[in-house]
Amino acid sequence: MFEAPHTRLKASDFQGLLREMMDKGCDYAVAEVFISCIGQKRADYIQFKWRYSRTLTGDHLDFHGTMESYFRSKLRLLWSC
């Protein structure tokens, strides 16, 4: 098992952890990626095989500012490759 030192890693730390896992023989990883991290592009260039989103509510407007911005971040999560 590999554990991250923080819940919201910088992109380079997240990718480094995935690289370390691969180097030690891991074939798969499961990651919860916060929508604010998608907005900050912390998971860019990581190819997820499966993705889903549970909700689209006003809970994260403090970060995203508008529902439109929040919705666009959700779209990036669901449709980016």
Image (cartoon, grey):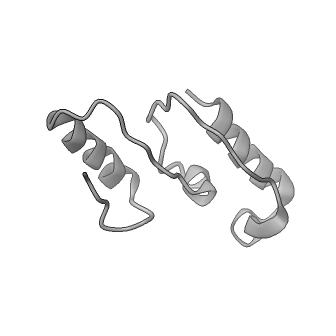
Image side of residue 52 versus residue 12, left or right: right
Q: Position of residue 3 (x, y in %)?
A: 29, 59
Which residue is drawn at the image coordinates 66% and 35% (left, top)?
Answer: 78
Q: Residue furthest left?
A: 24
Image side of residue 24 versus residue 3, left or right: left
Q: Is residue 6 above or below residue 13?
A: below
The image quarter containing residue 26 is top left
Which residue is drawn at the image coordinates 39% and 58% (left, top)?
Answer: 10
Q: Position of residue 21 (x, y in %)?
A: 23, 41
Which residue is drawn at the image coordinates 45% and 48% (left, top)?
Answer: 31
Q: Residue furthest bottom?
A: 62
Q: How many marks?
A: 0
Q: Is residue 79 above or below residue 69?
A: above
17, 24: nearer the viewer:
24
Quarter that holds the C terminus: top right
Q: Residue furthest front?
A: 1
Q: Position of residue 57 (x, y in %)?
A: 83, 60
The image quarter containing residue 60 is bottom right
Image side of residue 43 versus residue 3, left or right: right
Q: Position of residue 71 (x, y in %)?
A: 79, 48
Image side of residue 9 versus residue 27, left or right: right
The image quarter containing residue 15 is top left
Q: Is residue 41 above or below residue 27?
A: below
